Image (spheres, rainbow, N blue to C red):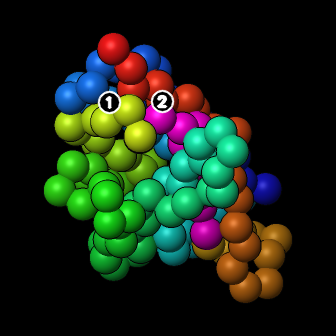
Amino acid sequence: QVQLVESGGGLVQPGGSLRLSCAASGRIFRTNVMGWYRQAPGKERELVATINSGDTTNYLDSAKGRFTISRDNAKNTVYLQMNSLKPEDTADYYCYWRGSTWASIGDVNYWGKGTPVNVSS
């Protein structure tokens, strides 16, 4: 029903920056929340940042001051600008979408396939 296409991951040195993008498409009626989660090897998936339809944002504590989430409602796209990256930021980053579709009753959740971020010298 909803497809999420992520881009922007890769290898970066500590202290560097990356910008992740995620475009949502499909039978979207209303987008309520978009955001990013990440999962490092051997660890559980954790919330990195979300932004809702009112532009209220929520961040992982360790991401505050370094990461900025934003969205382009016209394009149904969410961005994650990541600055001052650290080796502990290394993980697969997953786009998250919550909203309603033309076929759903109430909100549904969708996930992207993930894009790898590797912070290493």
Residue 7 vertical position relative to residue 109 in the rendered view, above or below: above
Residue 39 is at least partly visible in this image: yes
Q: CA distance from mark 1 to mark 2?
A: 9 Å
Majority secondary structure of magenta residues: strand
| Local SS, label 1 | strand
Q: Which residue sits at x=62%, y=72%?
A: 99
Q: Quadrant of the C terminus?
A: top left
Q: Give coordinates of residue 29: x percent, y percent.
A: 63, 69
Question: In the figure, is residue 105 to the left or right of 50?
Answer: right
Question: In the figure, is residue 8 to the left or right of 18?
Answer: right
Q: Quadrant of the N terminus?
A: bottom right
Among all residues in the image, which is located at the extreme top? 121
Marks 1 and 2 close (CB-CB < 8 Å): yes
User: How many numbered marks are there?
Assistant: 2
Question: In the figure, is residue 3 to the left or right of 13?
Answer: right
Task: Give the residues drawn in magenta, as a range.
Answer: 89-98
Question: In the figure, is residue 90 to the left or right of 80?
Answer: right
Q: Give coordinates of residue 88: x percent, y percent.
A: 41, 40
Q: Which residue sits at x=24%, y=60%?
A: 64
* Residue named by callout 2: 117
Residue 3 vertical position relative to residue 110 in the rendered view, above or below: above
Q: Which residue sits at x=38%, y=64%?
A: 60
Residue 1 vertical position relative to residue 56 in the rendered view, above or below: above
Q: Give coordinates of residue 86: x percent, y percent.
A: 31, 36
Q: Which residue sits at x=48%, y=30%?
A: 117
Residue 120 vertical position relative to residue 44 in the rendered view, above or below: above
- Mark 2 residue type: Val
Residue 35 is at least partly visible in this image: no
* Residue named by callout 1: 18
Q: Residues within 10 Å of mark 1 (few under 14, many from 20)?
A: some
- Mark 1 residue type: Leu
